[in-house]
Image (tube, grey):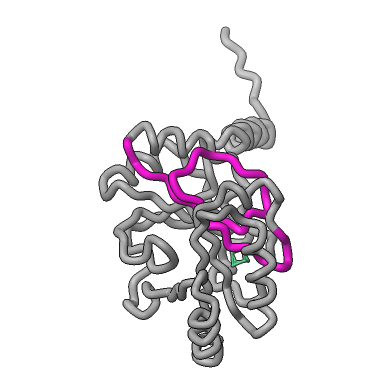
Amino acid sequence: MQIFIPVPKSYICSMINARIQDLLNKGEMLPLMEEFYTIQGEGFHTGKAAYFIRIGGCDVGCHWCDVKESWNAKLHPPTSADSIVENAKKFTNTVVITGGEPLMWELDYITNALQANKLKTHIETSGAYKLSGTWDWICLSPKKTKLPLAEIYSKCNELKMIVFNKNDFKFAEEQASKVGDNCELFLQPEWSNREKMMPLIVDYVMKNPKWKVSLQTHKYLNIP
Ligand code: SF4
């Protein structure tokens, strides 16, 4: 006679949790908040069709953040990176990984897989965490609440500074002094304060033409 020894449910759950955690640590799973095909609305690649992968988790704490629902990574299901790549390759050749703060996660695995499928890998990051992944384009958007690590300044292709108030011009210049000569510089009004700040940004860019204006054009177009 065969005897079945019941395995406690809590034990099975902890085995599954440990397995998922291991895959998250390796970047083979990521806490996916959403993925969608749209037009890049901001910065250097404005107007380009791109597949967006939004990964949950952020502790940078910008008070004006427009994706606060991304902050708690536990609310977003661990999702196989391979399945995200399979979805991405159905659309165009450009993928933007954003968040949240995507560098809270290990991104070597997914970016290698995306590039193996001939997709261009772009990231939007505050730079507050160690850089992982292989990138065709790095957009650095530093935040005062949690500054970028030093290593990313020489690697970013684009510096996108969000302007919420007048003090942000000084912060933008401080950050611009750290990036490489070929880095594209953008000033972008924070959305809720755009009417107040846009005239100041226009004036600033005309006086300091190394900067360009970035707008959240996807919001004007009413697309994601
Ligand atoms: S870094 Fe980005 S996601 Fe995180 S709080 Fe700031 S704006 Fe929001």
> Which portion, as a residue range, is magenta?
118-147
Picture coordinates of residue 84 (x, y %)?
Answer: 40, 43
**Quadrant of the rendered image holding ligand 1:** bottom right
**Left or right, residue 174 beside residue 188:** right
Above or below, comparing residue 45 to residue 27 in the picture: below
Q: Nearer the viewer, residue 179 or 197?
A: 179
Above or below, comparing residue 103 to residue 66 in the picture: above
The answer to whether residue 9 shows anywhere in this view is: no
Residue 30 falls within the magenta-colored stretch: no
Quick one: which residue is furthest to the top in this view? Answer: 1
Q: Quadrant of residue 105?
A: top right
Picture coordinates of residue 33 (x, y %)?
Answer: 49, 56
Picture coordinates of residue 52 (x, y %)?
Answer: 40, 55
Q: In which quarter of the image is the N terminus?
A: top right
Q: Which of 104 and 14 is in front in this view?
A: 104
Q: Nearer the viewer, residue 164 or 68?
A: 164
Q: In which quarter of the image is residue 27?
A: top right
Above or below, comparing residue 187 to residue 130 in the picture: below
Q: Nearer the viewer, residue 139 or 52?
A: 139
Q: Quadrant of the C terminus?
A: bottom left
What secondary structure predominates along the stretch shown in magenta?
loop
Picture coordinates of residue 46 (x, y %)?
Answer: 36, 65
Q: Which residue is drawn at 64% across and 58% down?
A: 58
**Left or right, residue 15 beside residue 145:** left
Q: Residue at x 38, y 49 (%)?
A: 95
Q: Residue at x 62, y 36 (%)?
A: 25
The answer to whether residue 24 shows anywhere in this view is: yes
Residue 140 falls within the magenta-colored stretch: yes
